[in-house]
Image (cartoon, helix red, strand yellow):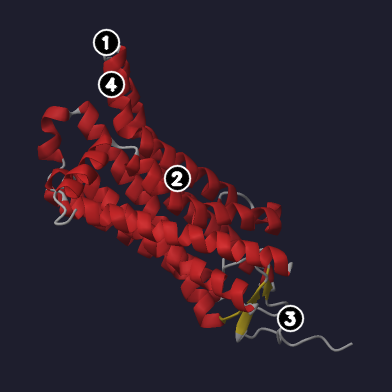
Amino acid sequence: MHTPKENILQNNTAPAEFILMGLSEDPNLQSVFFFTFLAIYIMTLAGNLLIILLTLADPALHTPMYFFLRNLSFLEICYTSVNVPKMLGNLLSGGKSISFISCALQTYFTFLLGGSECFLLASMSYDRYIAICKPLRYHILMNRRAYTSLALASWLSGLVMSFGHTSMVFTLPFCGSNVINHFFCDIPPLLKLACGDTSKREIAVFAMTMIFGTCPFILILMSYTGIIAAILRISSSEGRKKTFSTCSSHLMVVTLFYGSACFTYLKPNSTYSPNTDKYISLFYTVIIPSLDPVIYSFRNKEVKDALRRIWERKPFG
């Protein structure tokens, strides 16, 4: 029986394209998904762009904490833009193909931005640690050179991580199906399509993910161990509550990001479940970037005050 050429590749050749199965084959569900995720994407762009503009416009927010937040918002705009427009285009047109080069670039930028976010969240936790545990030395320890170096190191770490992951996966031979049971080019489903013995590559990818994922997480745990110890030494409950409120939003973002990402990547490839993993991926690639502005900023008193000051300075009304 003849097999469609888009589903079977020639032995040991790189495919010209992959086929993304997406979230559902049901046309009615595809329409629902399109309008839902389009609304979420617009909300993500608007919310994070507002944070960037607000923290640039208000001098009171020209602090290391909001410098990191500005970086995080820019990162979230880029991160969600790597995969969501392609997913929306596929939902709208019904087309599901993606070229080999585009797939590699999508994987590269997904891991560049995801890896950078891991280290950026660690930098933000260190900033909160210094602010709470060493408040008298905060402006010395977190000077411009220090916080810009931390941000730059975060981006460079993501660059190294993404290059390693992408090169290890896309130099594998693909000689079976080219159908990816996902809505973007993610590493676990791509490894399933590779032929031959891929166990060494799987171990290498897993080890690199462990290093670049757990190192910043350990730094976050260390920072919060010091923060919690400092908070417990505060005598008044009101003081403890006020101090903890300065880092509670960051802690929530860390929990959501690491919880979903670890479920997908920090487990053996043998336990990979395509349908489960792609919906978990949907959570951290689409949902979380839209929640970050709300979680991290709009419930923050300083941001609310900055919005009010800008509104009061408006040249109209």
Q: Which residue has dot 4 on it?
A: 230
34 relative to 276 in the view: left or right:
left
What is the secondary structure assignment of the residue under circle 4? helix
Mark 3–mark 1 contact, CB under 8 Å? Answer: no
Residue shown at 60%/87% (left/top)? 16
What is the secondary structure assignment of the residue under circle 1? loop
Is residue 271 visible in the rendered image? The answer is yes
In front: label 3 or label 1: 1
Inspect the image, locate mark 3, and give the three-letter code of the amino acid beneath it.
Asn
Q: Nearer the viewer, residue 74 or 215?
A: 74
Residue shown at 26%/10% (left/top)? 235
- Name the disc covering residue 214, or none: 2
* Sooner in the amino-acid sequence: mark 4 or mark 3: 3
Residue 145 locus on image (x, y percent) = 13, 51
196 relative to 202 in the view: left or right:
right
- Name the disc covering residue 235, or none: 1
Q: Quadrant of residue 195?
A: bottom right
Residue 269 locus on image (x, y percent) = 65, 56
- Name the disc covering residue 7, or none: 3
Is residue 157 visible in the rendered image? The answer is no
- Name the disc covering residue 299, or none: none
Inspect the image, locate mark 4, and give the three-letter code of the amino acid beneath it.
Ala
| Mark 3 surroundings within 10 Å by alpha-carbon count, few (fewer than 14), some (14 through 19), many (20 or more) | few
Q: Nearer the viewer, residue 276 or 158?
A: 276
Q: Nearer the viewer, residue 229 or 214?
A: 229
In front: label 1 or label 4: 1
- Count of labels shown? 4
* Sooner in the amino-acid sequence: mark 2 or mark 1: 2
In front: label 4 or label 2: 4
